[in-house]
Image (tube, helix red, strand yellow):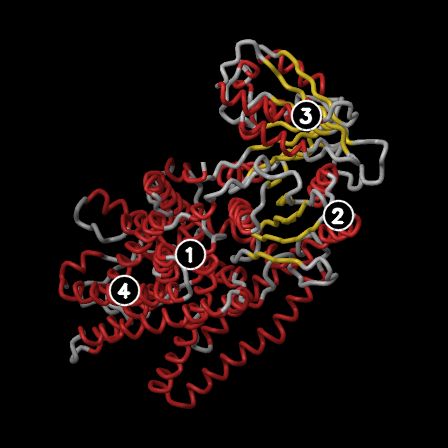
Amino acid sequence: MASNFTTYQEIMTANNGNFITLCMSFPPKASSNGIWDYVSGSSDTLRSSPLPLLECQMLIIFIIVTILHFFLHFFGIPVFVSQMIAGLILGSSWKGYSNSFDNFKEYLFPIVSQDILGLLSGFGYTLFIFLVGVRMDLNVVKKSGKQPLIGGVLLVLISAIIGSITAFSLSRVDNRGELINMEFIAAAQSFTSFAVVHYLLDYLKILNSEVGRLALSTAIVADLTSLSISFIATFIRSVQIHGVLNASMFFTSTIGSIVFVLFIFRPAMLRIARSTPNGRPVNDIYIGIIVLLVFVSISTNITTGRSAYSAPFILGLVVPEGPPLGTSLVNRLDGIITSVFVPLFVTINVMKADLSFLSYSTKFLARSTIVIIMTTVAKMIASVGTSLYFNMSSYDALAFGFIMSSKGIIELVGSSFFYDSKALTDQTYSVMVIDILFFSTLMPMLVKCVYNPSRKYTHYKRKNILNLKLDAELRILGCFHTQEDASVVLNLLHALHPTEESPVLLYALHLVELVGRSSPVFITHELHEQKGSSEEMISDNILQMLRKYGRSNVVSIEAFTAIAPKRLMHDNICTVAINKLTSLVILPFHRRWTREGIVESEDNAIRALNCHVLELAPCSVGILIDRGYLSSYHSFEHSNTSLLQVAMVFIGGQDDREAFSLARRMIKEINTAQLTVIRLLAEDDNVSHWETVLDTELLNDVRYSFVGRKAVRYVEMQADEGSNTAAIIRSIGDSYDLVIVGRRGGVESPQTSGLMEWSEFPELGIIGDMLASADFHCKASTLVIQQQQQCSFYGQ
């Protein structure tokens, strides 16, 4: 490995009298006999046995990284910073401050062990850069418009030009080596890596935001621009050093590799993807062959004199992103690479930096700092300027500039490669390590300070059902994870019985977890078109169901698919809700039942998603708990005699009034549902007079306007304490198909006294939690309603 070349090159070129004697045992013994070697008197078994030594080295590295991150994560600092600091601690920067610690490091990290450490970390980085290519979706750039193209090219070119001019101006003319080092600092600072930008966005949980999407697209363009410039510069330098013939051979081998990848490797990958059954993982044999080809490509690149890590990246680019192939590769490789190999790689490369060199060259440090500042300012101006030109808000533009100025593992790899190749001095490498450490620490903090994607969710108007006229169009955003979720929402929609006098517009959003690609995808479907792209085929079954329902009912439907990480899907939901001005968002509950009442599955990621939406949604939210009875599509559509039995449990408050407003819309001249409103009263009710007036006025509509209508009933029941309420809820569980309740989060009343401590799902409120309990056996499904929370002061 290149990292070891540095060590042994220094040994071989040492001055007379400074040679290091290395003792090795042949044949080498990888493992030891454990404690028995110590019993027999072999006290130095650890250093002479590579495997136990490697295990101890990894253990120490992971312990230090874990301890550092435990404290630093409270300040919003990513784990990458902890890995770099661990490298500085274990490196030679602090040599001489503690003899015992120096002896410990020399014992644990002897020179002879660097081969294995370098090989292991390089192996991991090879697969890491391959997965970066697999995740990169170049189609995102085409869909993003002009801004990423213009911004990506400009921020690289402008920052590179300004940085190079500054470096040339500050370098001594008679010192070519210093000029090369300063130019490298400028080039590295102008570089923007897709992998680093993706890591930062994912860490800040804004990967799915508008700024996040723009940053990913721009980073792809900037990455490709930098690679193109690097290729041209390498070719020109090859002509200058090796002549036109060798440079032409270099160029020909590069083009030949690209042709092989595009016309042989890519079709083979597509064939593997097509031959894999839908929903099934790719065969392990194919995965093994692909990984083998990755390492073959490295050997080919090294043989032809090209960059070792460019081949895995290009191979990753041509792998079809997403399921099945891209997803399978990420699922198989990502865990061990992210958790084991990358921390090792970062820590080991930072260990090579010796910050003590900087004290001997303060002038070089000052000049390097000026180059870094000027290049960063140029990049910020280019990023922010193009963003403002395309009408982005000032805060978002500033956050975008900070994101594009971030540094990480890719810059560290480049610096380490040139340092091992003797192109960079010790001082330059130390400057680059400090530069990367500084920017990877600072940028996440700055982005957090200026960018809050939830700001856009705050409405200045009430978007709920209560303030909506009965004849006004009800806009509902229905969210689905599976086809069964879609069936349940459509059955609920059927119970509302949309008519031309009381229309309903459904925005159907299919939520798909992002695996095997880095860029989130949002698709707008045309329901009248039967065929679509491969991405649209993910939602094909749901689209067929929506088409069928739309043709047979008086309802308008618009369909979308959002492919995103589950923990970031709330951004898609809230964005659609605010753009489409919906009054209600319906979410499926994270627990699923069979029709026999048995809990089938639970997904805590969906539960976390629901909680995020409840907190951030710009309109009212309903969580739909299906007990298996509503999941059969068309259950009630063709029956005029068998009505859907609906109960609305009313205690009081804004959430209950919102729930009643939805139930009220089920009452039509021709009904598909029979509604029973059950009001729970308490003698010692501490509710304010104004709340009581609002509740009574709303309920009087049912009490007096629908007298004699069989489809509507109003019942008042006494519930002076929680036990009375629990008994009433149990009694209605099997009498109705659907129970609608208000969430009433954090609201205490006599009717629910003593029930709070038994609550399992606070996001459902007390009554909703009771109906969703695994111990509560009933056939009724439940809809828990929360009235709009995200409303500004002016809208109150």
State the residue position of label 3.
702
Q: Earlier in the sequence, mark 2 or mark 4?
A: 4
Q: Earlier in the sequence, mark 3 or mark 4?
A: 4
Q: Amino acid at mark 4?
A: Val
Which of the pair 311/585 is nearer the observer?
585
Q: Amino acid at mark 3?
A: Val
Q: Which mark is residue 377?
A: 4
Marks 2 and 4 sit apart, C-alpha to C-alpha, by 57 Å
Marks 3 and 2 sit apart, C-alpha to C-alpha, by 26 Å
What is the quadrant of residue 490 in the picture? top right
Q: Amino acid at mark 1?
A: Ser
In the picture provided, is 458 more to the left or to the right than 572? Answer: left
Q: Amino acid at mark 2?
A: Val
State the residue position of label 1.
121
Is the C-beta separation of discs 1 and 3 under 8 Å? no
Q: Position of residue 590 (x, y in %)?
A: 61, 36
